[in-house]
Amino acid sequence: MRLILLGPPGAGKGTQSQRLADKYRIAQLSTGDMLRAAISAKTPVGQRAKGIMARGDLVPDDVVVGIISDRMDEADARAGFVLDGFPRTLGQAQALDRLLAEKGLKLDGVIELKVDEDKLLQRIDSRLRDMTARGETARPDDNPDAFKVRLAAYREQTKPLIDYYRSKGKLRSVDGMAGIRDVSRAIDTVLDRERVDAGYADG
């Protein structure tokens, strides 16, 4: 199974993609995690991305697509994967289409976590306050100002992907403002229906 999760920052994509990876025994491909790993390892890509991410800006497509391509070739991703944080632009979506075609792969579905942006900002503020109260340090790209930049970037550059994947018949939407378990159940219901329609066996 090969999936994409779409939704603004803070919508819960990471939580849901990890659960899907565990349930279906597929790889969670998080560009954020991969880029942070590159930053920690001080690789050339990491050094290039560090300042960009700290500002809340998007990392250039060529860097992200290269990382995704390499990651798809690793053993744990061959059985399937869930993409978290990619694609973020129409150009990346088209690059992903080409990449999958080159590898002889296809997407099984795109799940949109629909959210109320005002409530999402309140959720992020609350999360940051909780982290501060626990003495935890937020990531450089997780402060309120950077978050607003990321949200604006999502609205301008990523939201058009909703129509892009809808036009391809791949998009399914769930309420991302519900509790984590309710969101999980909604996603499972959508995927179970897709698997039945596609003729997958149970399991």
Image (cartoon, rainbow, N blue to C red):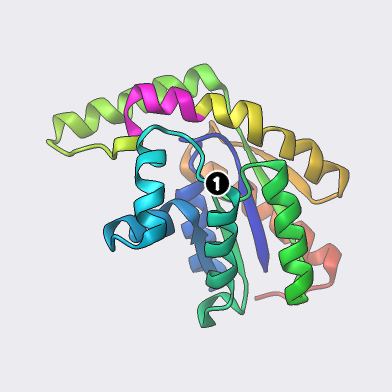
Looking at the image, the residue that sits furthest to the bottom is 75
Residue 2 lies in quadrant:
bottom right
Q: Is residue 6 magenta?
A: no
Residue at 38%, 60% (x, y): give it: 44
Looking at the image, the residue that sits furthest to the top is 118
Is 138 on the left-hand or right-hand side of 76? left
- For label 1, count other residues whose C-alpha is less than 10 Å away and answer few (under 14), some (14-19) or many (20+): few
Q: Main secondary structure of the magenta part?
A: helix
Q: Nearer the viewer, residue 70 or 63?
A: 63
Residue at 73%, 40% (x, y): give it: 161
Coordinates of residue 169 in the picture (x, y in percent): 86, 49
Magenta highlight range: 142-150
What's the amino acid at mark 1? Pro
Q: Give the residue number, with chain letter if any, for mark 1.
A: 60
Q: Is residue 25 visible?
A: yes
Q: How many marks?
A: 1
